[in-house]
Amino acid sequence: MLRFMYTDALPEDLDGCSPSGDLLHGLLAAADRYALDALKTVAAQRLGDAVSVDNMAAILSCAEAYGCPELKIRCLDFFMEEENFRKVVLTRGYLTLSLSLVDSSTTSGRGSRIGKGAFPRRRRRRRTRMDGDLPPLLCST
């Protein structure tokens, strides 16, 4: 990260590492935390270039966690191709991603719970004089 801050380039030894490895994920996390938008963009582009059946779920969750909409779109485009879809849904990463999405949706807010209390209770209004029936004289024309 420091090398990027001073040179605006990723280290050469990054090219030899596994693109699905933790190094690019770590760089993306650090770039997001320290608001290094240029590094975040470069790391997201590298991860987008490296999307495969085996790492799509991990990269998608990383894109969601660190606010990378372009990376998320690339992952979803890759996933939507029929041949990739059939392979990705069979991976452990996809199962983990699916379970984490279900967990986050069931605990995120009151309206997202399923079962008792899923929908907020409707409040009753107090009746006022205006809520009552109008006298027949005022209703006729």
Image (cartoon, grey):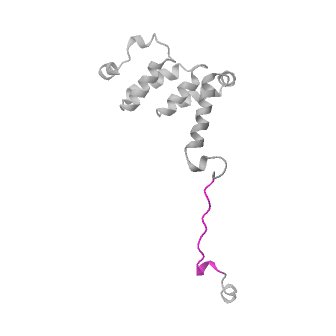
Residue extending furthest front? 116
- x, y percent for residue 43: 44, 23
Most prominent secondary structure in the magenta stretch? loop
Which residue in the rendered view is the most extreme toward the bottom? 137
Residue 101 occupies quadrant: top right
Residue at far left of view: 6
Q: In which quarter of the image is the N terminus?
A: top left
The quarter of the picture where residue 58 lies is top right
Q: Residue at x 51, y 33 (%)?
A: 64
Q: In this image, 11 relative to 131: left or right? A: left
8 vs 106, left or right, is: left
Name the residue located 53 percent from the left edge and 18 percent from the top edge. 50
Pick the residue in front: 129 or 116.
116
Up the image or down, 101 lies above or below 45; here it is below
Q: In which quarter of the image is the C terminus?
A: bottom right
Bounds of the magenta segment: 119-132
- Residue at position x 36%, y 29% in the image: 36
Residue located 36% across and 18% down the image? 9
Residue 77 at x, y percent in the picture: 60, 28
Q: Is residue 66 above or below residue 54?
A: below
- In percent of width and height, residue 42 lies at 42, 23
